[in-house]
Amino acid sequence: MSERLRANKFLFGNDGMKSPRNTKLALAIGAPVLALLAAFLITSLVLILAGDDVGGVWGQILSFPTHRGYVNIINSATVYYLSAVAVAIGFRMNLFNIGVDGQYRVAAFAAAVVAGEGWLPGYFNTALAMVAAVLVGAAWAGIAGLLRVTRGVSEVISTIMLNAIATALVAYLLRKAAVENPGSNITATKEVPEGSRIGGFTLFGDVPATVYGMVLLAVAVGFAYWFIINKTRFGFDLRATGASETAAVSSGINVKKMIIISMLLSGGAAGLVGLPLLFGNDYAYGSTFQSGLGFAGIAIALLGRNHPIGIALGALLFAFLDEQSNPLQILLDVSPDIVKITQGTIVLTVVIAYEVVRRYGVRIEQRRVSSALDDEPATEGASA
Amino acid sequence: MNSTITSQDIVVRLRDIGKTFPGVVANHDVNIDLRAGTVHAIVGENGAGKSTLMKILYGVQKPDSGTIEVNGKQVTLLSPADAIAAGVGMVFQHFMLADNLTVLENVVLGAEKMHGIGDGARKRIAEISKSYGLDLDPDVLVEDLGVGARQRVEILKVLYRGAKIIILDEPTSVLVPQEVDELFDNLRDLKAEGLAVIFISHKLDEVLSVADEVTVIRRGATIDTVDAKSVNSRQLAEMMVGSELPNPSTETSTVTDRVVLEVKDMNLPGPSRALLTDISLTIHAGEILGIAGVEGNGQAELVESIMGIRHGATGVVALGGRDLSHASTRDRREAGIGYIPEDRQRHGLLLDAPLWENRILGHQTREPNVNGPLIDRAAARKDTQRIIEEYDVRTPGIDVLARALSGGNQQKLIVGREMASDPVLLIASHPTRGVDVGAQAAIWSHIKRARRDGLAVLLISADLDELIGLSDTIRVILRGKLVGEFDPATVTPAMLGSAMTGADA
């Protein structure tokens, strides 16, 4: 017994802590890098088959962006980031919230109407609109949560349906809320008053484009996400439920309550997605308001492994590919849609790479455990 | 041993089989002779290497060394297809059947070329079913079959493919006693037809009742092959563990008159019949109440109802006089119930979380794991380290994933965790199931020590020696009712056994 204690302490002091950490880190970085390379390779194959200029396309995409490009990348990454965090909250609970897309559009519309009315002065108006966006997004997602716990409806099905309903609902209400816009055929809500808009940061003196002020919101949301998930009791319950619902129930977690709360949180975060656009760019919700952000969020959350920093890198990567592909049409007569193929492929390769790495990691760990305890035949890995 | 069996009848000869996984020797020096017309049992503790060995014989794993001879010819088995071609078939512990297909469809799936998928196959299935007494109708949907019949479908599948050597991996673990008897009758039919059966189990009484020869595996190596008629289960068990068995017996009684748990008139309706009927029981401080019963007679429902995990039970659950009948699972845990669940991997652990996070599980609201609404990572880690040392959890560190530990060490971690918050009541479901003997002895001694300190324990176990050894009182559960009460000092496993099956006079 005492020998065993010494052995434990010994192992602890040495490789028990450090080298596995490094291995984990190397695996965590290696997986997405490999996945990216694979995705680039597959994209290249598509380009070759279509007879396009492979070198030229990559030369453009992998060049340094313009100053204006940098600003655009940060701005669209901001929006992607919020969307991916909203999805990731669900993922940590094993909830597949496909509905971020519908949630952010309903919420952005509600925020645009509230902000456009301008009931409160200046930034109070902004704050009120933000609260409205969070509440509406949460409520829209909450429907799916409620259906899941009371009727057992899979949130995948219900959120897909709610996306469709959201599209129709917003289109219908937009007609009612739209204002006359002479000289344009765009239907849009009332513009947000000047004093309630969120200004941007100037990054480069030589371009007028500015970085959304709401980038700070994305940073704050990322921090809050990290803190709540990793540091709080609530976050522990959420992760435990996601990791094993049966173990969560036995540990005393009210899983139904957790499903409702995490759907509300996910929806609330989804409500924020449209706000940088609303207050920093469009100033109204109209028929041209950016769509599809929720689906990009799913891909980015997968790519970033639900990790706040990983998601940020994923969002920047997607935004970078978007921005760099824009001139392809003009320069090389290649449709920028080629990067959509790259983005889609990345998601697939990343999922595969993470699974491979995860299995490899488990194997390494089992080997490490059994070699550290070589007097005991740990055949768990063998018989599994 | 049957005198007609000679060495010419050896159908499988394994010589010096070795298999090493990175860092782990799963098998070494394995030597087995399997004879036609016999049931050959392979016994060993969990993790002794039985499954790996059978995967080698079934072509799932390739041995690193040694030779396999089937019917006198040396063979190389690189896949199950090779094994089937050599006449070796395997029935896995977990059935691989499509519920929405018929018996016929399940059997021909993947073997369509043999007798087609129509009447030819139907005829062949009927023949096999008849000659081995399997009693299966080819056109019944598998979902309409009971567990025993499904297992027979698996055996039929193997026979249909022409196997003469059949491996059964823990076949009785999913069966009720009557089904076990039926299975054994089937096995006797198989061996009467000259087939060879390898029967893997760790239930020694069953092994002795059905096997002709028994090979004991310990730590990956074959220890000995003995005639089943010449040994008893205790001798086999000692060969399995390589030492004298630990003894579960508790010492002098520590039962007090202070009631800790009181369950009154608990009833739990089920879909067809009541799952629990009029359960009333009392456990005092320092008392271990053992519940004996054939699995599936309401033990799990009783435990889950007391824990508040399963809803729908009526009646009263009171802990130290406090009514918890309507409390949540968390409230019940906080009131001082420690819980060692039956299925530690599904209910007791987050397999892909590190040990220190598993220390928090189930104790998310209590010291030392939390500080207000926040997780106190440092304190939780420190306490995990303490548990690892005090409970002898063999691990290189607390950042290891729970999945990487062996079953016994996982269980010791759970026991340490549940004892950590000084419970007044411990509910232990099969606390030593599937753990090695060392861990078993350690877990028993922890339970005994806690009992001396005034803990009340509800012990559910299928291991009658464990129940008799540890308990102060034994109650028998049968079809959701408590049917008998026994004094462990005088009761024998045979008496309990007949009460458990309702054969009691």
Image (spheres, grey):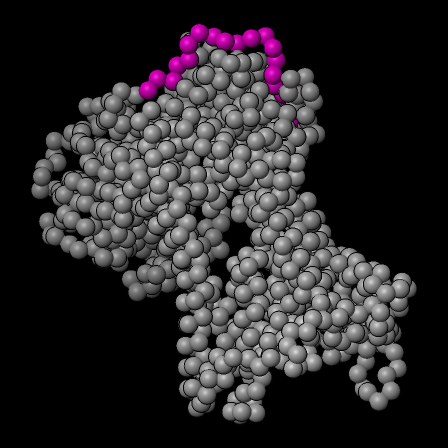
Q: In this view, does A158 lie to the left or right of B215?
A: right
Would you place residue B235 above or below residue B103 in this image? above
Residue B480 on the magenta segment: no
* On-image quarter of the N terminus of chain A: top left
Would you place residue B106 above or below residue B432 in this image? below
**Which percent across, then down, holds residue A371?**
29, 42
**Which percent across, then down, holds residue A139?**
76, 57
- Residue at coordinates 33% horizontally, 45% vertically from top-left? A368
- Residue at coordinates 59% horizontally, 8% vertically from top-left? B257
Residue furthest front as drawn:
A205
Residue in front for this viewpoint, B253 or B2: B253
Residue B264 on the magenta segment: yes
**Which percent across, then down, holds residue A203?**
64, 74
Residue in front for this viewpoint, B377 or B241: B377
- Count all numbered tags in the image, as a single digit: 0
- Residue at coordinates 89% horizontally, 67% vertically from top-left? A118
First to last magenta residue range: B246-268
Residue furthest right as drawn:
A119
Asked if residue A249 shows in the view, the reply is no
**Which percent across, then down, holds residue A342?**
50, 76
Asked if residue B367 shows in the view, the reply is yes
Q: Is residue B238 left or right of residue B314?
A: left
Residue in front for this viewpoint, B134 or B466: B466
- Residue at coordinates 48% horizontally, 79% vertically from top-left? A62
> In which quarter of the view is residue A293 placed?
bottom right
